[in-house]
Image (cartoon, rainbow, N blue to C red):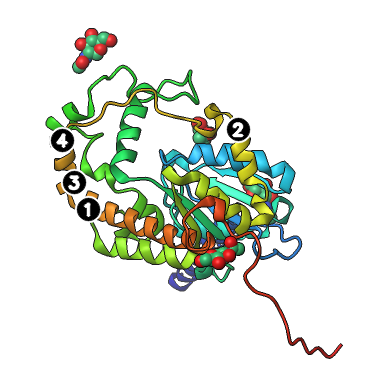
């Protein structure tokens, strides 16, 4: 009697356990189905550009007046990566899925991908790195532009009501009362975009984040320009990445003022000297500024070399400064 019920108990336990295993397997395969990739042709190298654009750096001008316009002429696809709730950081499974997806999506290649996303290291997942490019802006200028953009909108999406519409507090007034939108924490943005997906990247004033951002800029970005020198940036891209940007400078120069300066914030009030000195005293500003200066010097050096040491766009070297010789081949 007792042994039967014990067996029965054992059996029902086993049954429950099996049910559990089946259910779990089902859950896992469901999870994986959502992340399925259809592998087509082998991906080709150099066919993906990622422009992980920072808000309010002139990125709309560059994206629309260059990438979207040139796609047809040069035969590439432009894709916007829309990050849920504008959060620039992905989970590890999302990174893997994203990398596998864009790397295998040969129908869309060559592909110019732009979005408000932090640097993602493809090589960590065993994939070749895409070509990264970006534009930076002086950190306080960027924040001021963003601050007034939230209040007054811009000339690009005119009808769209911005989140702080109706609020006419100036940046100075905001700093005086220690408001949120002008907090020095809001300056911490260009470093995290380059630093990437590590937790310390978003820690305001973290020096390791600055060093990582610099390292990524040097090692993984083909070119990083500054918004006040967009024309120089486009000229170098035109010659350095012809597959995507052949004819970009000519096209940019042919645009009228409204398109080549797409998206300027409607109203901006210059901050007082006192506000400027408060901002400049903060660690967040100092590190962001150090990063910006680093990027600018790096771009300058590239530009000098490409313009035969003159720094003038008109002297851009169009013929290569090397040739082949003493060729000895066996076929
Ligand atoms: C990548 O994702 C898009 C959107 O979900 C999908 O349409 C496309 O088929 C995917 N590409 C590959 C190669 O699976
Ligand atoms: C991103 O997607 C959301 C949800 O579909 C949409 O409301 C938002 O306008 C999109 N962002 C941009 C810049 O198009
Ligand atoms: C904002 O502007 C309105 C008029 O458009 C004015 O009545 C109001 O006093 C202003 N507020 C501040 C804080 O300047
Ligand atoms: C580059 O500059 C040197 C002088 O520094 C000049 O002799 C040379 O002709 C220039 N090259 C080109 C292609 O302009």
Quadrant assignment, res 209: bottom left
Q: Give the farthest residue toward the right.
A: 331
Mark nearer the N terminus (4 vs 1): 4
Say which residue label 3 marks: 280
- Disc nearest the viewer among 4 and 3: 4
Q: Earlier in the sequence, mark 3 or mark 1?
A: 3
**x, y percent for residue 215:** 39, 67
Q: Are marks 3 and 1 in contact (CB under 8 Å)?
A: yes
Q: Helix, strand or loop at disc 4?
A: helix
C-alpha distance separating marks 3 and 1: 7 Å
* Secondary structure under the numbered disc 2 in the rendered image: loop
Q: Element at badge 1?
A: helix
- Mark 1 Cβ and ligand 3 under 8 Å apart: no
Task: Report helix, strand or loop for mark 3.
Answer: helix
- In the rendered image, residue 4, in percent from the top left (x then y), is placed at 49, 70
**Residue of label 4:** 273
Q: Gap between marks 1 and 2, in whole Å?
A: 36 Å
- Give the image location of residue 295, x and y in percent: 38, 57
Residue 8: percent from left, percent from top: 50, 66
Q: Residue at x 47, y 61 (%)?
A: 304
Mark 2 and ligand 2: say if the CB distance to the nearest ligand atom is below 8 Å: no
Give above or below for 203 relative to 331: above
Question: Can residue 31 be seen at all in this image of the molecule?
Answer: no
Disc 1 target residue:
286
Q: Is residue 50 above or below residue 68?
A: below
Q: Residues within 10 Å of mark 4 (few under 14, many from 20)?
A: few
């Amino acid at each position: 009697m007792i042994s039967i019920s014990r067996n029965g108990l054992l059996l029902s336990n086993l049954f429950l356990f099996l049910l559990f295993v089946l259910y779990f397997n089902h859950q896992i395969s469901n999870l994986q189905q959502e992340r399925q990739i259809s592998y087509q042709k082998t991906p080709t190298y150099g066919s993906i550009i990622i422009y992980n654009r920072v808000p309010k750096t002139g990125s709309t001008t560059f994206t629309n007046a260059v990438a979207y316009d040139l796609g047809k002429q040069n035969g590439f696809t432009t894709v916007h990566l829309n990050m849920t709730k504008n959060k620039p950081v992905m989970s590890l499974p999302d990174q893997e899925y994203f990398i596998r997806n864009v790397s295998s999506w040969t129908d869309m290649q060559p592909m110019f991908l732009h979005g408000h996303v932090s640097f993602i290291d493809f090589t960590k997942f065993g994939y070749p790195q895409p070509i990264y490019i970006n534009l930076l802006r002086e950190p306080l200028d960027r924040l001021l532009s963003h601050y007034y953009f939230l209040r007054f909108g811009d000339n690009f999406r005119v009808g769209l009501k911005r989140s702080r519409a109706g609020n006419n507090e100036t940046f100075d007034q905001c700093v005086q009362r220690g408001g949120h939108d002008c907090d020095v924490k809001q300056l911490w943005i260009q470093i995290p975009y380059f630093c990437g997906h590590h937790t310390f990247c978003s820690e305001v004033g973290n020096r390791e984040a600055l060093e990582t951002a610099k390292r990524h800029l040097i090692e993984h970005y083909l070119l990083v320009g500054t918004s006040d020198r967009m024309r120089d940036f486009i000229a170098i891209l035109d010659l350095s990445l012809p597959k995507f940007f052949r004819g970009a400078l000519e096209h940019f120069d042919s645009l009228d003022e409204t398109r080549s300066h797409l998206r300027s914030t409607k109203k901006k009030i210059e901050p007082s000297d006192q506000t400027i000195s408060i901002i400049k005293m903060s660690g967040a500003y100092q590190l962001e500024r150090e990063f910006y200066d680093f990027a600018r010097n790096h771009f300058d050096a590239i530009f000098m070399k490409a313009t035969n040491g003159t720094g003038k766009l008109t002297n851009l070297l169009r013929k290569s400064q090397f040739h082949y010789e003493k060729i000895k081949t066996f076929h």
